[in-house]
Amino acid sequence: AQKVTQAQTEISVVEKEDVTLDCVYETRDTTYYLFWYKQPPSGELVFLIRRNSFDEQNEISGRYSWNFQKSTSSFNFTITASQVVDSAVYFCALLKETSGSRLTFGEGTQLTVNP
Amino acid sequence: DARVTQTPRHKVTEMGQEVTMRCQPILGHNTVFWYRQTMMQGLELLAYFRNRAPLDDSGMPKDRFSAEMPDATLATLKIQPSEPRDSAVYFCASGLSRGSGANVLTFGAGSRLTVL
C-alpha cells in the first residue's frame, strides 16, 4: 500500500519568514513520482512540481525549493521569504508507476502567511 | 492557459434528487479523473478514465454514483439518489498518460455540492 503523510495540519507564519512543509511517503515501488499541489482559497488545485524516484536533485524555482531524500522517504517543500499570497492548502501526492496514473494525496497543510 | 471546465460551480439540492456534474477536459488530454474533497476524508479518487475508457471506479459508491465519458470533450458524474453525506466539492482533472507532461494533472475549479 502507498501512503502520504503531511504531519503539519496548519502552519502560521509572518510575512518574509521562511517556512518548510513536510511530506513523508510510503511505497514499496522503486519507480514512483512525487508531486506538490497548491490549493488557494479559490479552490482550484494548482500543480507546482513533479519529481521521479530516480532524481534526488533538489530543485529551486524562485522562492520555492524542494528537498527530496529517498533515505528518509521525504519530499519537503520550502518557501523562502513567504508572502501573503502564499496562503493556501498545500498537498503532497504520490504516484506509483504501476497505479495507472492514480495519485495518492496527503491530508494537506494549511499555510497562513500573516502580514 | 488551457483549463478544465466544470459545471455547475455550486449546486444545492434536496435528498433524493438526481445530480449531474459535467467536466470538459483540456483538449488533447487522454486521462480524466473525478476526485471528491471533504474535510473528513480529504481528496478521494472516485473514477478514472483513459482514452474515454473507465479504468478504475473502485472509489465510487456503485449503487448511486455513475461516471461516463460520452465523448472526448465531456465527462459526467451522476449521483442518483443524492444523500446529505454526498455533500462535498467534486473535482475533475485531466492529464496525459505519456510524454514529458505525463501524470501532471490539471484540475478544474470544482463543483460544490450541498445535499439538504
Image: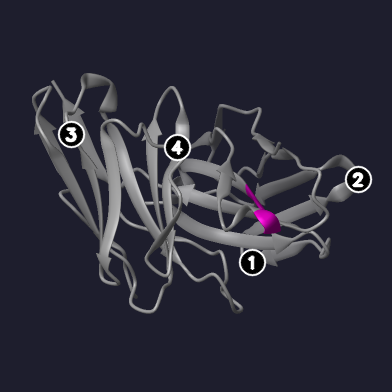
Task: Tell me the residue at 64%/66% (across/down).
Answer: A61
Q: CA distance from mark 4 to mark 3?
A: 16 Å
Contact, mark 4 vs mark 3 (Cβ under 8 Å)? no
Q: Nearer the viewer, mark 2 or mark 4?
A: 4
Q: Could you tell me how far apart the alpha carbons at marks 2 and 4 are, in whole angstroms? A: 32 Å
Amino acid carrying label 2: it is Ser
Give me the chain letter of mark 2: A
Considering the whole magenta stretch, tell me its main secondary structure.
strand
Q: Are marks 3 and 1 in contact (CB under 8 Å)?
A: no
Tell me the quadrant of the picture where the N terminus of chain B can be found.
bottom left
Residue B54, quarter of picture: bottom left
At label 4, which amino acid type do we have? Gly
**At 25% across and 28% down in the image, what residue appears?**
B87
Identify residue for label 1. Answer: A61
Give whichever of B101, A19 is nearer the camera: B101
Provide the residue designation for mark 2.
A71
Give the residue type at disc 3.
Answer: Gln
What's the distance in space between the residues labelled 3 and 2, CA to CA? 47 Å
**Picture quadrant of residue B102:** bottom right
In the image, the segment drawn in magenta is: A94-98
Q: Which residue is mark 3?
A: B80
Badge 1 and badge 4 both on one subunit = no
* Label 1: which secondary element: strand
- Going by the image, does B50 lie left or right of A25? left
Task: Name which of mark 4 and mark 3 comes first in the sequence.
Answer: 4
Q: Are marks 3 and 2 on the same chain?
A: no
Snapshot colouring: one colour
Q: Which residue is mark 4?
A: B59
Label 4 chain ID = B
Q: Are discs 3 and 2 less than 8 Å apart at CB?
A: no
Above or below, B115 against B9 in this view is above
Q: Nearer the viewer, mark 3 or mark 2?
A: 3
